[in-house]
């Protein structure tokens, strides 16, 4: 669901940024129609609910379950860490990749794919 101040977070594993981008980025066919990526299909996300320009993604050189390392390159890093540290039941699996979709509160209907695990949605402002 589209929101004004929520970010949804996924963590997983990819060989490199190109592999992550191939999994996530929307493409266009010869007629200019959007080709929905595996990420949006896997997590059953309606692309009309998100703004492509508000997706951040990164691949780290090593796996970690330390959320402060995983979010090091994220916008609003400090606010996100405060929100996530306040969640008592939050479990972070080891990963080397993070995907953040700002102004979107994912409903959590699909918790994981072959590549990513949905972590949570939190306020970032």
Image: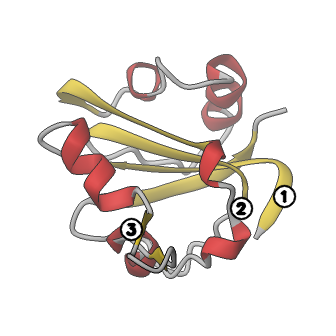
Q: Earlier in the sequence, mark 1 or mark 2?
A: 1
Which callout, 2 or 3, points to the residue nearer the camera? 3
Vertically, is 38 above or below 71? below
Q: Position of residue 98 (x, y in %)?
A: 40, 40
C-alpha separation, residue under disc 2 versus residue under disc 3 = 16 Å
Name the image quarter holding the N terminus: bottom right
> Disc 2 marks which residue?
105
Q: Secondary structure at mark 1?
A: strand
**Against 99, is 59 above or below?**
above
Query: As drawn, which residue projects farthest toward the left?
Result: 15
Q: Could one spot residue 89 in this view of the protein?
A: yes
Residue underneath mark 3: 39
CA neighbours of label 3 inside 10 A, class few (<14), some (14 to 19), many (20+) = many
Residue labelled with disc 1 = 3
Relative depth, front residue between 85 and 1: 1
Identity of the residue drawn at 84% across and 58% down: 3
The location of residue 122, given as percent across then percent down, is: 71, 47
> Which quadrant holds the C terminus?
top right
Judged from the image, the secondary structure of the residue bearing numbered disc 2 is: loop
Mark 2 surroundings: few (<14), some (14-19) or many (≥20) residues within 10 A: many
How was the colour assigned to the protein in this rendering?
A: secondary structure
Circle 1 Cα neighbour tier, 10 Å, few/some/many (<14 / 14–19 / ≥20): some
Instruction: Name which quarter of the figure residue 23 lies in.
Output: bottom left
């Amino acid at each position: 669901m589209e929101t004004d101040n929520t970010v949804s977070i996924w963590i997983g594993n990819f060989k490199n940024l190109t592999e992550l981008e191939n999994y996530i980025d929307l493409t266009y066919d010869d007629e200019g129609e959007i080709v929905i990526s595996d990420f949006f299909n896997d997590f059953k996300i309606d692309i009309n609910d998100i703004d492509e320009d508000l997706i951040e993604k990164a691949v780290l050189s090593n796996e970690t379950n330390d959320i402060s390392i995983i979010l090091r390159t994220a916008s609003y890093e400090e606010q996100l860490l405060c929100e996530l540290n306040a969640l008592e039941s939050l479990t972070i699996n080891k990963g080397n990749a993070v995907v953040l979709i700002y102004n979107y509160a994912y409903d959590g209907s699909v918790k994981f794919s072959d590549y990513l695990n949905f972590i949570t949605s939190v306020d970032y402002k």
